[in-house]
Each structure stands twice: as C-alpha cells, then as structure tokens.
Amino acid sequence: MFGDITTNPYHLETIIRSDLTKALRSLVPEMLEEARLAIPEHLQMTDSVTSVSIPVFPTMVHLVARVSNRAMIGAPGCRDEKFLKKQVSVAEEVIPMSQILNWFPVFLRSAVWKLFCVTVGAKDDAVRLVSPYVQSRIEYAQQVDPSQALDNPNTITDLLLRYAPEEDIKDVTKLAVRVVHLNMAAIHTSGIFTTHALFELARMPPQQVQEIRAEITAAIDSEGGVCNKSAVGKFYLLDSLLKEIGRFHSLFAVGSSRVTLREAVIADGTVLPQGSVVAFAPKPLHHNPQVYNDPDTFDPFRFAKLRRGDNTAHDIQQSFTNLSNDYIVFGIGKHGCPGRFFAALKIKVILSELLLSYDIAFPEGASHTPKPFAFNIFTVPNPTAKLVFTKRTV
Ligand code: HEM
C-alpha cells in the first residue's frame, strides 16, 4: 500500500521509538501554541459568541490533525485545510478498505487496491499536498547547523531527515509518504480518546471536573506558570481519566495481531502451528475482576487513586502510557505503540486548554453519550453526537 515503508521502516525503528520521545520537550510549546490558536476556530467561537453546540468527534479529529501536524510538519503546513482534510480522509478510507481487502483472495488484493486508489486517490492526494511542506523542512535542514536541528527539532519531519537515505531526500514523495503514514497512526486514535474524554467530562459531577482543573492549574503554577512537558507530566487526574477511557471503551474487538514464525506453545499448553494468526481481545483483559476492582464501573480517578505519589515503578505502572499484559490499549511487546508518549502529551495539551477555557455540557434534553459506531473490529464515538462548549468567565 505504501511503497518501501514496510521493507525499510526507518521512520519506526529509529525515529518514533526513541528520538520522538526525547524531542517531546521541544514540541510541547509548539503544540500548545497551535491548540490555543486552533480551538476557538474549530469550535467556531468568535468574540460575540459565548456558547456553541458542536458534533464532537469530527471536530476533535480535525483539531487533533492540526495540532499533530504542528509537531509533524510545522506551521504553516499544519494550517493547510486542504491537506488536513485529505489526511483525515486517508485514514477514513484506507482503514475500512484494508478490512474489505481481507475479503478478497490474496492474488486479487493488489488489483483491488489499485482500482480503489484510481477511483478515490486519497493517499496520493495527501502525499502531493504535504510534499511542499516536507520539501521546506529539507531546505531548512540544509541551511542550519545540523546539530542545532537535531538537538532541538522543530518538527518530527526534522527527525525523519536524520535517518532518511539520500534517495528519499532527493525524492520528496518518499518522505511525504512516511509523514502521511505516521499521521494515519496518530490522528484518529488520539481524536477518539479526546472525544471520549469530553463526553466523560460532561457526565462527571462538577466537583470532579473542578478537581481536574485545579490539578492542571497547580501543575502549571509549579512550573512558573508555563505549561511545559514537566507540567503536563503532573496532570495525574487527566492521565487517570484517559487510562480509564482506554480500559472501558475498547477501540477494537481484537488487536496486536501477530503471525507465528515457528511452532509455539503458549502457557496453557496449546500448540500454535507455524503461520498461525494470533490476536488479543482487550475487553476480557480490561474487565478482569482479578485485576480491576469493580471492573464494569467507569471510575475516572481509578488509576490516580492507586498512585502513592512517590514516582516509583508502582506509580509509573498506573500511567496511561504504561504497557502491561492487563492493559493493551497501546498493544504489547516490541511492536507496542511507539507514538504513545506523543499521543498522551498531545491529548492532554488539547484537553487542558479546553477545560481551562470552557465549560462542557450535554445539549438540553441529552444526558448520556449516544451509542458508538462499530465497523468490523473497530468502534468509534458516534460522529453526530454533540456537546455544548461555553466560555468560562473565571
Ligand atoms: C491514543 C492514541 C493511540 C493509540 C490508542 C494507539 C494504539 C496503537 C496500537 C494498539 C498499536 C499496535 C500495537 C501492537 O501491535 O502491539 C499501535 C501501533 C503503532 N502506533 Fe499507535 N496509537 C496511538 C497513537 C499513535 C501516535 C500519535 C503515533 C505516531 C506518531 C502512533 C504510531 C504508531 C506506530 C508507528 C505503530 C506501529 C508500531 C510497530 O508496528 O512496530 N500511534 N498503536
């Protein structure tokens, strides 16, 4: 589907796995600035408007796309609406299509995919639209002192350039494909979490929402009034809310699928022949009463209450991004999501800005989140469900 990115996945092996996580410190101010600019625009909030009712999921997906791309390609590319719309539609078309392809015999899949691309063309369009911005990062990297660009990257594309082979730098399309691919992994997943969080915040007793706000404000104050990476790292209640969302609202019925390369015997003695496809089902794991107390109750502060406040391994295990056999929202093992630290920071930056600036409530007459929308193994929030955002005066 995406050329040589599967045979030479340098954008995963070297960049996302380690460098991106190190670079997050310098990317947080960029994302924060973008969130502050983008939120009123996406909520369609003007000086004369104090309250709006908007469909949350599509709005959050587009907001996340913009904030993510501030980190991915920088400004002004992250504000190019034509590119962002195409990038969002790539995932919306390619992911269902990848499921549909499974219905065809292997020998027909390539032809069906090509036909799909000719008729829809979303991926190619997104690559074409992002290419000029990727090209400008190539030119920037060629002008500045390389150590400066590497130590303080302005964008994830700057990191990508560090490892790109010469032929990818000469042919901007090859790098652009990797940006589109990373965006596909980054946008909808984070948009789903942001949306669930807003519906949960609307459902919560006001006292609990106030506790989250107070903790955010205290964390920012503790960093001299600056919302930097360290401050976001102290948003424990928000972190707990996100982790509980991942536990409670499964994104997929089965995930982290793997193929056995040789015969394997699992703990209960079952023999898996070579070539078996195995996958994990999050729901039974995430609702296991031996691990989670009262597992069928949504408790936003469940994981915050388990923290001891000493920042030891025990506390780290309670965090949203921690991988474990009992919590597989980000997968598990070697292929566990490498973008999870970036995702968590981005979602927290967006949610904290929304929480500090707006009151969030259900529209009149509605009191619960409408049923999510399920397709094949995936479940996403209902795309038409609305919330009301009202400017806060304090
Ligand atoms: C809340 C947001 C996110 C969720 C829930 C999520 C979830 C996942 C899951 C379940 C996997 C499969 C892991 C496995 O097979 O064991 C995965 C893989 C991956 N994710 Fe994420 N992800 C999120 C955000 C991101 C972001 C922001 C990025 C990139 C910037 C990203 C990049 C990737 C990549 C590149 C892989 C493939 C890793 C590999 O095959 O080795 N993800 N993600």
Image: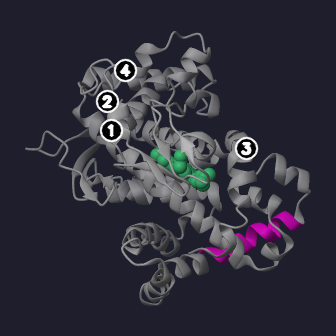
Return the residue nearer the eye: 179 or 292.
292
Query: Label 3, on which residue?
Result: 18
Q: Answer yes or no: do the residues labelled 3 and 4 have beta carbons within 8 Å?
A: no
Which stretch did the figure color magenta? 130-142
Dot label at residue 145: none
Instruction: Examine the rendered structure and indicate whether residue 227 appears above or below residue 196.
Output: above
Q: From the viewer's perspective, is the residue at label 4 or at label 2 nearer?
A: 2
**Cα distance between the residues tagged 3 and 1:** 30 Å
Q: In the rendered structure, which disc, 1 or 4, sits on the residue that comes first in sequence?
A: 1
Q: From the viewer's perspective, is the residue at label 1 or at label 4 nearer?
A: 1
Label 4 Cα crowd, 10 Å radius (few <14 / some 14-19 / many 20+): some
Q: In the rendered structure, which disc, 3 or 2, sits on the residue that comes first in sequence?
A: 3
Query: Label 1, on which residue?
Result: 283
Q: Quadrant of residue 180?
A: bottom right
**Cα distance between the residues tagged 1 and 4:** 17 Å
Query: Label 4, on which residue?
Result: 302
Amino acid type shown at disc 1: Lys
Amino acid type shown at disc 3: Ser
Return the residue nearer the eye: 80 or 88.
88
Query: Label 2, on which residue?
Result: 287
Q: Answer yes or no: do the residues labelled 3 and 1 have beta carbons within 8 Å?
A: no
Instruction: Examine the rendered structure and indicate whether residue 311 appears above or below residue 32.
Output: above
Label 2 Cα crowd, 10 Å radius (few <14 / some 14-19 / many 20+): some
Residue furthest left in the image = 365
Left-right relation of 226 to 136: left
Residue located at (28% from left, 47% from top): 50
